Image (cartoon, rainbow, N blue to C red):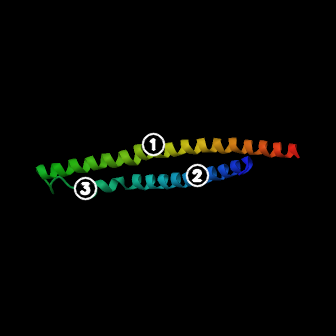
Amino acid sequence: MSYLASLMTGRTEKLEQLSRLRQAKSTLETLQMDMVQHSRDITEPELPPNAWKGTTADKFEQKRDAALRSYKDISHNKMDDAVQLISSRMGALHNSVQSTEIRIEREKQRIKDEK
């Protein structure tokens, strides 16, 4: 395979990766919004103090609070980290595509100059 063909194939692969990362980022952001909207569902229904009493009620509330904290950690921190990681990778790929396009243009010019 010629150098130019290799460069063009590499650019195409990078553009495909970039497209998949954009889709993944969009999907994660949508899921994150859904999680944030539904976080209140963990504490529903609200249990009135006169309905439940004692250690069983206390343990249930503690478990519910722990679930809510975990849910918020995932929906805010972990998903933010994942989105940031994808964005970083997208930036690196974008830079790589630009660099490859410059090399493609140089190689095309080199071939043209040889003729």
Dot 3 surroundings within 10 Å: few (below 14), some, or many (20 or more)? few
* Name of the residue lying farthest toward the left: 54
Label 1: state its secondary structure: helix
Between residues 6 and 69, which one lies in front from this camera angle?
6
Q: Position of residue 111 (x, y in %)?
A: 82, 46
Q: Are marks 2 and 3 in contact (CB under 8 Å)?
A: no
> Which residue corresponds to mark 2?
17
Mark-to-mark CA distance, 2 and 1: 19 Å
Q: Are marks 2 and 1 in contact (CB under 8 Å)?
A: no
Q: Residues within 10 Å of mark 1 (few under 14, many from 20)?
A: few
From the viewer's perspective, is 94 left or right of 75? Answer: right
Circle 3 residue? 46
Q: Looking at numbered disc 1 in the image, what kind of residue is underneath it? A: Asp
- Label 1, on which residue? 81
The residue lying furthest to the right in this view is 115
Classify mark 3: helix, strand or loop. Answer: loop
Mark 2: which secondary structure?
helix
Could you tell whether 20 is left or right of 106 in the image? left
Instruction: Name the residue type under label 3.
Output: Glu
* Along the line of sight, the residue nearer the viewer: 89 or 57: 89
- The residue lying at 22 percent from left, 49 percent from top is 63
How many marks can you see? 3
Task: Decide which of 98, 79 is in the foreground and name it.
Answer: 98
Q: What's the distance in space between the residues labelled 1 and 3, CA to CA? A: 31 Å
Residue 73 screen position, x and y as percent: 36, 44
Q: At which x and y percent is residue 86?
A: 52, 46
| Residue shown at 74% from the left, 45% from the top | 104
Which tag is nearer the camera, tag 1 or tag 3?
A: 1
In the image, residue 33 sits, relative to residue 81, either above or below, namely below
Type of amino acid under label 2:
Gln
Q: Residue at x 72, y 45 (%)?
A: 101
